Image: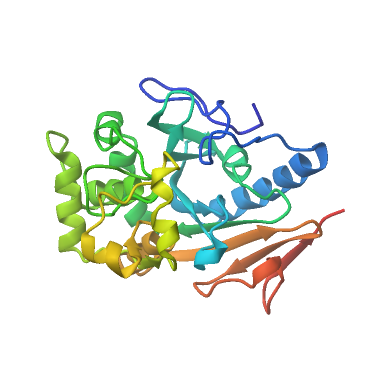
Amino acid sequence: MVPGAAQAMPNFASSGNAGLSRFCDKDPSLTVAEESRLLRFAAIVRQELSAGDSDIALISRSGLDLSRFGIRYSHAALAWRATSGAWSARQLYYACDEGMPRIFDQGVAGFTMGTDNPELGYISAVRLPRAAADELRPALLDGPRVLNLLATQYSANAYAYSLRYQNCNQWVAEMLAVAWSDMPDGPQLRARAQDWLRANHYAPEPVPVGSRILMWLPAFVPLLHVDDHPQEDRDALRLRVSLPASLETFMRQRVPGSDRVEICHNDKQIVVHHGWEPMAEGCQAGPGDRVVKLD
């Protein structure tokens, strides 16, 4: 287990198992140089999370390569700071060996290492003002409510307003709904959370599939499905799926005092970029960005 990886807790799973956010046959091994670079990267991510007095952040990473769809970030979690000062990311993962979705708590180093490309990676963090973080924290750390929001079936491209499946980002959206509405635990918690999201104008940006051939992939890839999506979306080749970008937009609208930072690395440098405008591709520094050179 890499430093900062998940810690087991009652009713939650440990993320020591391999391949969690990727396809089950992926090899997660890293070279010594790659692990060293990612650990340095994780240290700067922790510094940025700790800047200010907020104890809660929406944290996202570039996991699966979705650049063909114009998507940089594929996986989001809610990070919180313990009284010890350590940060953990609470998230939904698909546990390949168990064949089911689980909730995992993971340290920052483990979170940053869950990427398909160890040579180039991005982390985005939206840090909440202290008052907003204090509203979210009780629900995020309430084990029964957290687990009651977990669907029994996973789909990487789950429709945002269906109860049939769930992906990692949809669990975060529903967690935000429960927290911000102070929704009590009980039956139909996911349905109630989705009703709140609709009423509060959560609207994931449609993902243009681009080719009808890609709509046939679910017949061959077990973690993809389209049977939960409305027929008009399938016909238009545009699927409404919860992604980190939609979560960030929603958080910015709900909590105007939130601030955003992006941190990236390539084989030469780490770049820290503050603001809501996306940083340059290829981890190139722009005006005002902080650069940390790598040996």
Splitting the image into 4 quarters, where does residue 233 fall? bottom left
Image position of 49 with respect to 34: above or below: below
Q: Is residue 90 left or right of residue 178?
A: right
| The image quarter in which residue 290 lies | bottom right
- Measured as percent of width and height from the top left, residue 61 is found at 54, 52
The x and y percentages for residue 102 are: 39, 31
Would residue 11 appear left or right of 193 to someone viewing this image? right
Q: Position of residue 252 (x, y in %)?
A: 37, 67
Task: Reply above or below: 85 against 206.
Answer: above
Residue sitting at the far top: 10
Quarter of image, res 191? top left
Is 149 situated above or below 212?
A: above
Point 33% across, 40% down: residue: 140
Is 201 left or right of 30, judged from the image as shown? Answer: left
Q: Using the image as rendered, state which of residue 295 and residue 160 is in the foreground.
A: 160
Looking at the picture, the colour scheme in use is rainbow
- Quarter of the image containing the N terminus? top right
